[in-house]
Each structure stands twice: as C-alpha cells, then as structure tokens.
Amino acid sequence: MLFSPSPVRKRLQLQISERRLMLMAGDVLGVLIAVTIALFVWSVVARDQFDVEFILPRSHWFFVLTGLWLLLASANDFYELRVAANRGASAQRLILINLQMVILYLIVFFFAQPLALPRLFILYYAVASFLLIAVIRLLNPALSGWISARRKVLIVGTDWAAMTIIGAIGRYAHDLYDISGVIAESDDVLKDICDVPVVGTGKDIARLVYTEQVSELIVTSTHELSAEIFQGVMDAYEHGAAIVPMPLLYERITGQVPVEHVSNNWAVVLPMDGGSIFNPQMAIKRILDIVISLVGMMVFIILLPFLALIIRLDSPGDIFYSQERTGLNGRTFRIYKFRSMRADAEAKTGAVFSQKGDPRVTRVGRFMRKTRLDELPQIVNILRGDMSIVGPRPERPEHIKRLTEKIPFYRTRLVIRPGLTGWAQVRYNYGSTDEDALIKLQYDLYYIRHQSLLLDLNIILRTVYKVIQMGGV
C-alpha cells in the first residue's frame, strides 16, 4: 500500500538559480543607489543643482556601471554561493571588483579626450558601492534568514554516480544541500555510501519526503529505474518534491558536465536546439574575433623585435614554434607560438603533455608561459579562422586519438572552433595527464552547452586576471 501523507506546508527554500538572482538583484540595487549618491556628490562639488536637468544628461552611468558591475562580479565568482556565504571571501572579492572597475575607468580616462569623462566621479561611486553592496549582502535573504536554509535532498541510487554527486556536494555545495540519505534498489546493499546512510528503498521514498521534509530527489541514473523506484519518485513528485537528474545538478554546482556518468545520453552533453540562421551569435562572435585580433596584432608587431631578440639570446633555435593541432570538425591546422622550449624538446619523447616545471622550458620561455605571451602568434590563426578567441584549447592529433579511446564524448569538443582561451583554462589548473584531460573536457562540454557572448566575455575577463597574476605554466 502506498504511503499517502496529508498535505503539509513546507518551509520555503530557494533554488540555486533563485538565490543567485536575489544576489544580483541586491547588487543592482546597490549600484543604482551608489550612482545616484556619486552624482549627488558630483553636483555638490561642482556647485550645481541636483535635479532632473543635472541627472538626465548623465543617466547613461546607471546603465554603464550596472552592466560593468555584473560582468566583473560574474568574472570574479561573486555570485558563486559558496563564495557569497563566506563573509571574508565576499569582502575580498568586493574590494577586488571595485579596484578592477577603478583601474578600467582610469585606463579609459587616460585615452579619452580631455574633459570627456568626470575625474572623481568613479571614486565617489566606488566608495558608495562598496559600502552599500556590503550592507545589502549582509541583509540579503538569499544568504541570511529562513529561506536560505539548506535544501534537504535524497540521493536515489547507489552507483558511482551517487558517489560522485555526494563528493561534488561536499566540495562545492555543502552550504546549499543537506543530504538526508540514499535510496537503494533493494535492502541487499551497503549500509552507507561515502558516509551517507542508506535510509530505504523505493517504497520508502514518499514517507521520507514527508517525514524528513525533503525538497529534492537527486536521481543518479537516467535509465532503467525499477518499477518500485519509479513509483516512489512519482509519489514524491506529486507531494511537491523536485526531481533532478544527477548530471544536471553536477553541472549546475560545478560548471562541468560529468561525461563518465551520462552513458549514451546525448541530451545532457550537447545543446539540443542546434544552429539557426536567425541566431546572430556566431556572426557577432566572428566579428569580435577579428576586431580583437587586429588590436592584438598591433601589440604583436610592437613586441616582436624584443621577444625575438631575447628568445634567440636565451637558447639556440627558431623564434617561432609551429605544431599540428585538431580544430573544428576534426580539421587539422598548424598553430603558431613563440618558442618556449629547447629546439630538441621532443626529439626523444615524441608528443607528450608538458609538465609543471618542465625542464625543457627555457628561462625566457618560463616567463612567456606565465604571462601567456608565447600564445600571441596565434592571433594569425584566429584571423585565418582556424581558431576563435574563446573555445576549447586545440589539442594535438596524437592526443585526440588516444583520449578518444579512453574518455567518452572526447571528440565532442571538436564541434566548435577551438579557442585561444576557454572555460577549462580559467576554471582549472594546467593539465598534464589523461585524468586532467577528462576534467578539462567536463569544463569544455559545459561551455559547449552554455556558450554565449556573455560567457565569452566572462572568460576573457577571467583570462586577463590570470595573465595579470602570471598564472600560466
């Protein structure tokens, strides 16, 4: 007999996306008030009347600074809930975002025509926005109060996918989810999975949802649910519990696609909408690639004589290094770099991944890798259409062949044009093993599923930050 609890009023709990939206809404409110305060101080200093006639010609700052704030905040993980829940980390990111905004403004101010931009306005704004957003973050109900309580969840399944999602919640979303237990196919299973107790089978799901106030069921298998498990999941759904497949939740909290746990389910690996002639995104992206590359070409021409001289003085060999890579739809092309290794680097080893602290790297090469200057000649590849500014990093055909045999969906990363930088490069450290290649593929697939101009801009901002930090290897 199925368990049929009477209706119960559940405690309101926000989903991850809803909490992030509340954080963004609070920040936007803080930015708008800060702009208003900055304009007011501007009018006082200028001995001008603070009225509609003063505000209207300067109203564009409301839109410019709001958009810039959201971009910089996203690029600095300010809306990652594990960061937002940590006051110390949030304060550091808040200071960093304001500093980045001030620096960016000063750069534009330096190149702008005299008197084209206000001199101290951005300083007034930075102080006001820092104080306001700090206060709003402390009071934001997405972080404090009863609606920010951890969502109680049940894991439905005891396979490797269950272990993976339990580990991911522990690493990335401990403050967001409270795992009440694991649901097994039968009683003949382990007593716990990764220290999470097995609390029942399919017939117990509805009862546990009612008695434990469970908000969400995480189903680890998208195929072959038993009749008992399926019925229990449907009963729980009818009583208000959300149902989420493990791959989608994993993607949501980590920014990766768990390719080793999706079997042949292409729906959770690739976007299903396909291409459209009415979608201008790819055309706009290509135009931006060309514009950014032309600017980069100017930098390349200026630095070329100096870099060529120090490369040649540091070690014998050519200035440039060319290598075959696999690009869009499996087409091979030659990638160009400034040489950062000895001329005979692969004479004995053949095609191998570069290691951290690789002895084959020259002294000048080590500096160029840390600052990503060795990648600068790839602007030629971008102008030719071999690559884009943002996309999965192009890999060597030898590695593609080997990794395709070992890693599910590895060739999927070839469905879009490779990039100078990518989601895997800004979210993961330098990879030198096949295990690293798997993790980077998870990030690449996330980018393929969610690619947009905003995500590209986010990646570019993160890349600039890593270059400033000299985070290359």
Image (spheres, rainbow, N blue to C red):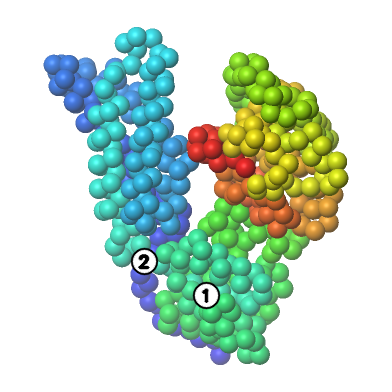
Is the N terminus in the top left, top right, bottom left or bottom right quadrant? bottom right
Q: Position of residue 417 (x, y in %)?
A: 72, 35
In the picture, the quarter occupied by the C terminus is top right
Residue drawn at 65 percent across, 48 percent down: 356
| Local SS, label 2 | loop
Compare residues 74 and 23 and report the one nearer the observer: 74
Tell me where residue 176 sits by quadrant: bottom left
| Residue holding disc 2 | 149
**Mark 1: which secondary structure?**
strand
Among the 4 quarters of the image, the one containing residue 108: top left
Q: Is residue 8 left or right of residue 40?
A: right
x and y percentages locating residue 392 in the rendered image? 68, 41
Q: Earlier in the sequence, mark 2 or mark 1?
A: 2
Residue drawn at the location 26% of the way across and 53% of the way down: 139
Q: Are marks 2 and 1 in contact (CB under 8 Å)?
A: no
Q: Identify which amino acid the numbered label 2 is placed on.
A: Ala
Name the amino acid, label 1: Leu
Q: How many marks?
A: 2
Q: Residue at x 45, y 52 (%)?
A: 80
Q: Position of residue 433 (x, y in %)?
A: 72, 54
The answer to whether residue 437 is above or below residue 275 is below
Q: Which numbered tag is attached to residue 469?
A: none
Question: For mark 1, what is the residue?
Answer: 154
Quadrant of res 425: top right
Spot occupied by residue 157 in the image (x, y as percentages of width and height): 62, 76
Dot 1: within a 10 Å radius of its alpha carbon, few (fewer than 14), some, or many (20 or more) residues? many
Residue at the top extreme, as displayed: 114
Question: Which residue: 34% across, 53% down?
Answer: 88
Q: Nearer the viewer, residue 353 or 105?
A: 353
Q: Is residue 261 above or below residue 323?
A: below
Q: Residues within 10 Å of mark 2 (few under 14, many from 20)?
A: some
